[in-house]
Image (cartoon, grey):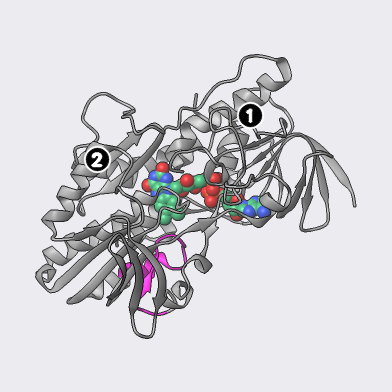
Amino acid sequence: MSVRRHDVVVVGGGNAGISLAAKLLRDGCRDVAVVEPKDVHHYRPLLSYVAGGAATLDDLRRPEIEVVPRGVHWYRDRVTAVDPDASVVHLAGGDALGYGDVVLCPGSRVDWDAIPGSREAVATVHASTSYLPEHAPDTWRMLESLTSGRAVFVISDRHVPCAPVGLKPLFMAADHWRRTGVLGDVTIDLLVEGDHLVGLARADRELRAAAARYDVRVRTGTTVERVDPSGRTLHLRTPDGPGTLGYDALYLAPPHRAPEWVATSGLADEGSDGFAAVDPQTLQHRRHPRVWALGDVATVATSPSGGALRQQVPVVAHNVAARRTGAPARRYDGYTVAPVTTSRHALLLAEHDRDGNAEPTVPFPDLVRPGRGLYLFDRYLEVEVYWHRLLRGKVS
Ligand SMILES: Cc1cc2nc3c(=O)[nH]c(=O)nc-3n(C[C@H](O)[C@H](O)[C@H](O)COP(=O)(O)OP(=O)(O)OC[C@H]3O[C@@H](n4cnc5c(N)ncnc54)[C@H](O)[C@@H]3O)c2cc1C
């Protein structure tokens, strides 16, 4: 086994990993390595628009080589373990990388096992999800072709990245059904595991009002325990007890889980569901000071989102350097954002901290009021901001 050493090793070349690597270079760190097995980088927020029939997969994909910052050493490999005592990262290909600091950004992945029957259900034409690129186009095919019957939208609160965006396919489909004159023939149920649709109270009210305009039956505190794909039936746990619900079209924002090697490397705590146990403010590991985590894999006591990385990236970049110089650490207040369409042309932005306090990027206009400008911003402009600013570490 050969061991090469880098000043900072970043695990994962997704939104968090590439943005952080670029920011570290900008801040003067000379020796940064990224480990990422995939050749293609996805701008994942556009998956919701693919599922809503307003984008294609081509709109959100770029070769990974184009987004890895020049000067960063890219290992096209997969991390299988981190040994924080030896300060070594192990790769599937057999190599090992020594590090000064290691930053975990491997994201999370769909946990089909959390809802028995859900994996089998999405293999049929009657169920789908926007949370995987291979299913997002099917979601729109399924919703667009429904002209009568029951459409059920399910949003889990178990580590789903930017969970409220699961409402985008709902509102875009409902608007489509209204425009094509079939809304009255489609019964829409929204089942939400948590007690709110989004973590900002005023935005929650806006979304419930939008749901009411399409006659959506909203049920919070409702968990899908099992799916029976052949009978097209959901088995539910509700505040009133167990129940069942049939469906003709089923959309799932399914539970997610952390990569297993985070826990087997001793980097998750009991109660963290296997996610990296970092201080939610400094993003430094609670027991291993040279280990950091951000993005969907980190326990940060707020809803994970790409928007949250605008603040997490500069915090980690600063704190990695501060650990070495003894400078005071920067703190992340739990800022997160959920952009949710309320139709095929309007969108609101719910920006808040981890306590649910509003934290708008700009005081004016009111971003919680659904508008066309915001829709265009989220669908088109934000995509360019992602490729040209966020992935290039242009955050402060
Ligand atoms: C359908 C959908 C819609 C979304 N919409 C929005 C939105 O509108 N607004 C918003 O702010 N956020 C949104 N998000 C959330 C946002 O995309 C994520 O929060 C963000 O991508 C998290 O970045 P990450 O780097 O932590 O994870 P990812 O972007 O998932 O990247 C993780 C990377 O790590 C790699 N990796 C995994 N395991 C290993 C390993 N063992 N070794 C090396 N590399 C590994 C993966 O291949 C991947 O490239 C959405 C997410 C989805 C799925």
Q: Residue at x 60, y 44 (%)?
A: 105
Total count of labels: 2
Q: Return the residue nearer the eye: 194 or 126.
A: 194
In the figure, residue 99 lies in which quadrant?
A: top right
Give the SS element for disc 2. helix
Q: Which residues are magenta?
A: 124-140
Residue 55 visible here: no
The residue beneath circle 1 is 24
Q: Position of residue 382 (x, y in %)?
A: 37, 40
Q: Is residue 215 magenta?
A: no
Q: Residue at x 62, y 43 (%)?
A: 276
Residue type at tag 1: Leu
Q: Is residue 127 magenta?
A: yes
- Label 2 neighbourhood size at 10 Å, few (<14), some (14-19), many (20+)? many
Is 341 on the left or on the right of 227, as rendered? left
Q: Residue at x 52, y 32 (%)?
A: 312
Q: Alpha carbon of mark 2 to alpha carbon of mark 1: how far? A: 35 Å
Which is more N-terminal, label 1 or label 2?
A: 1
The residue beneath circle 2 is 203
In the figure, residue 200 lies in which quadrant?
A: top left
